[in-house]
Every structure is written in C-alpha cells, then in structure tokens.
Amino acid sequence: MEKETFSEELEKLKNENARLMAALGEAEYECERLVILNSNLERQLEEANRELEKNIEILQGFKSEIEGIVSSIEKVNKK
C-alpha cells in the first residue's frame, strides 16, 4: 500500500474542511430559522394568553351575574 503524499493528505483535509464548513453553514441557517419560528410562536402565545385573560374576566362577570340571579330567584321562592 502506497503512502499518501503530503499534497494528497492536504487535499483530503481541505475537502473535509469544506464539507464541515458547509455543514456548519446549514446548521447556522437552521438555527436562525428556528429562532424566527420561536419568536413567532412566542408572539402567538402572548396573544393567546391575552385573549384567555379577557375570556376569564368575561366568565367571572357571567358567574357573578348568575350568582346574583340565583340569589334573586331563591329570595322570590322563599316568599
């Protein structure tokens, strides 16, 4: 088996380095894409939480109204 020459070994290392740099570029691109996706999801979650808080307030208002109606009905029934 022949020994590789320095230039052949150097060429292999250059090719491997190029392959690794391309893989790194792809990983960086995917990371940036995921950061954007995460940011969008965070905004959607914040909006959903705001809507949920509003809905909870509305439901609490309905609960108070229903309790008042039930109390009024109970007073009428006791008479």
Image (spheres, helix red, strand yellow):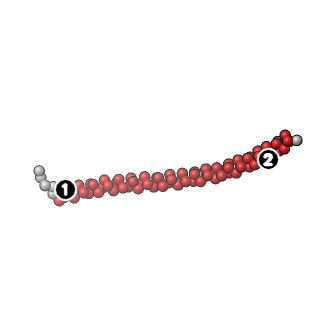
In this figure, which residue is indicated by the disc labeled 1?
8
Of 27 and 42, nearer the camera is 42
Which residue corresponds to the image point at 67% horizontal and 49% vertical from the top-left?
A: 56
Image location of residue 17, percent across then percent down: 29, 57
Mark 1 or mark 2, which is nearer to you? 2
User: Could you tell which of marks 1 and 2 lies nearer the N-terminus?
Assistant: 1
Q: Residue furthest front?
A: 78
Image location of residue 4, percent across then percent down: 15, 55
Of 78 and 31, nearer the camera is 78
Q: Quadrant of residue 24?
A: bottom left
Of 75 and 56, nearer the camera is 75
In this figure, which residue is indicated by the disc labeled 2?
68
The three-letter amino acid code for the residue at tag 2 is Gly
**Mark 1 and mark 2 residues within 8 Å of each other at the beta carbon:** no
The three-letter amino acid code for the residue at tag 1 is Glu
Q: Is 5 on the left-hand or right-hand side of 77?
A: left
Q: How far, Cα to Cα, is label 1 from label 2? A: 89 Å
Q: Is 21 on the left-hand or right-hand side of 47?
A: left
Q: Quadrant of residue 76?
A: top right
Q: Quadrant of residue 66?
A: top right
Which residue corresponds to the image point at 71% horizontal and 49% vertical from the top-left?
A: 60
